[in-house]
Amino acid sequence: MPELPEVEALRDFLDDRLKGRSVERVTPVAVSVLKTYEPQPSALEGQVFTGVSRHGKFLDMEAGGLHLVVHLARAGWLRWRDSVPPGPPRPGKGPLALRLSLAGPEQGGDGGGFDLTEAGTRKRLAVYCVHDPSQVPGVARLGPDPLADGFTREVFAGLLRGERHRIKGLLRDQSVIAGVGNAYSDEILHAALLSPFKIAGELSEEEVTGLYEALRTTLREAVERSRGLAAGELKAEKKTGLRVHGRTGQPCPVCGDTVREVSFSDSSLQYCATCQTGGKPLADRRMSRLLK
Ligand SMILES: [Zn+2]
C-alpha cells in the first residue's frame, strides 16, 4: 500500500506531467471506483490541470476548479501512459478501474494519460470528483501532515498526551497523523528503538523526542529516495528501503537479530526484539495457537 512517501513522489510525478494539460476524457471502468455522483467526472473534460497536491495518502488533481481526488488503498496503483489506446476501455475482470486521457497537441487526441488499476478482489480504490477536497470524508478527517513546517515536537507531544492506545495503532490512525500506514509505522518504531505495543500516552519525554525525530527522518528520507522516480518504479523502491517491515526472518540491519512478526486478522507488524523490546519477543496470537 502506498503511504506518504510514495504518494508524495506520485504527486511530484503527476504535477510535472499534468500541469497545463487539458483533460480529454475520464472513463470510470470498475463499477465501484467512483464514490461521488455530482459533479460527474465528465465535468473535467476540456478543463486544464492547474496542479496536483497531496492530503495524507490522497492525491488531489485540480482542473477548472474541480478536484479529482484519489485514494489508492491497499492494492490500487497509477500507471502512466505516453499513449492511450483508442476506443473505450472494456469493463471486465482486468485491473483497470479508471482511465484519464489528455488532449493531444492539436486537441486531436492521444496526449497520453493514466490508468488507475487495482489488483485483487477486495475493491478499495476510491475516486471522488468534488468542488473542494474537504468534501471527501477521509480528507476532512485527516490529522496534521508530519512533514509540514508547523508539525513541531510540541504538536506531536500534544497528539500523544493522554492516549491509551498502543503507539503502533496511533501512528497509523489517519485522524491523528496523516499519511503513515502499516509499513512506515514499523520503520519509524524500529528507528526510534520503541516497542510497537507501548502505550502512546506513557512515553517519556526522551522517548517522545526520539519518536518525533524518527518519524520526520524516516519519512523525509523515504520521500528523498522516491522523488524523481517514475510511477512504475516506486513500489520496488519502497521495498528496498525498508529495514524491518515485510522482512520477517531476515537479519535486522542494525543489530543482526532476526526480524520477528506479530500477526493480526488482516495485517501483521514486524519488529526487532533486540532493538525495540529489550530482547523479549512480543506475544503473537498465531504463534501461540500453533504451540497449543
Ligand atoms: Zn535490531
Image (cartoon, helix red, strand yellow):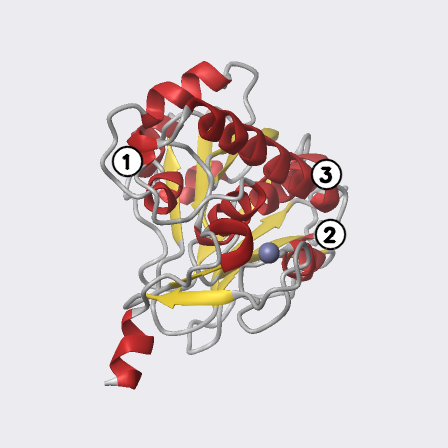
Q: Is residue 8 above or below residue 124?
A: above
Check if mark 2's residue and mark 3's residue have beta carbons within 8 Å.
no
Q: Report the amino acid beneath label 2.
A: Ala
Check if mark 2's residue and mark 1's residue have beta carbons within 8 Å.
no
| Horizontal side of residue 107 vs 275, given as left or right | right
Residue 222 spot, x, y in % from top left: 66, 43
Residue denoted by label 1: 137
* SS type, badge 2: loop
Quadrant of the displayed image that contains ligand 1: bottom right
* SS type, badge 3: helix
| Horizontal side of residue 270 vs 8, given as left or right | left
Residue 148 spot, x, y in % from top left: 54, 21
Q: Residue at x 57, y 35 (%)?
A: 214
Q: Nearer the viewer, residue 28 or 209?
A: 209
Q: Is residue 146 above or below residue 183?
A: above
Q: Nearer the viewer, residue 10 or 237?
A: 237
- Ligand 1 lies under 8 Å from the Cβ of mark 1: no
Q: Report the amino acid beneath label 3.
A: Glu
Q: Report the amino acid beneath label 1.
A: Pro
Residue 240 spot, x, y in % from top left: 69, 60
Residue denoted by label 3: 224
Q: What is the C-alpha distance between the residues marked 1 and 3? A: 29 Å
Residue 88 spot, x, y in % from top left: 52, 65
Residue 145, visible in the rendered structure: no
> Badge 1: how crowded within 10 Å, few (<14), some, or many (20+)?
few
Residue denoted by label 2: 230
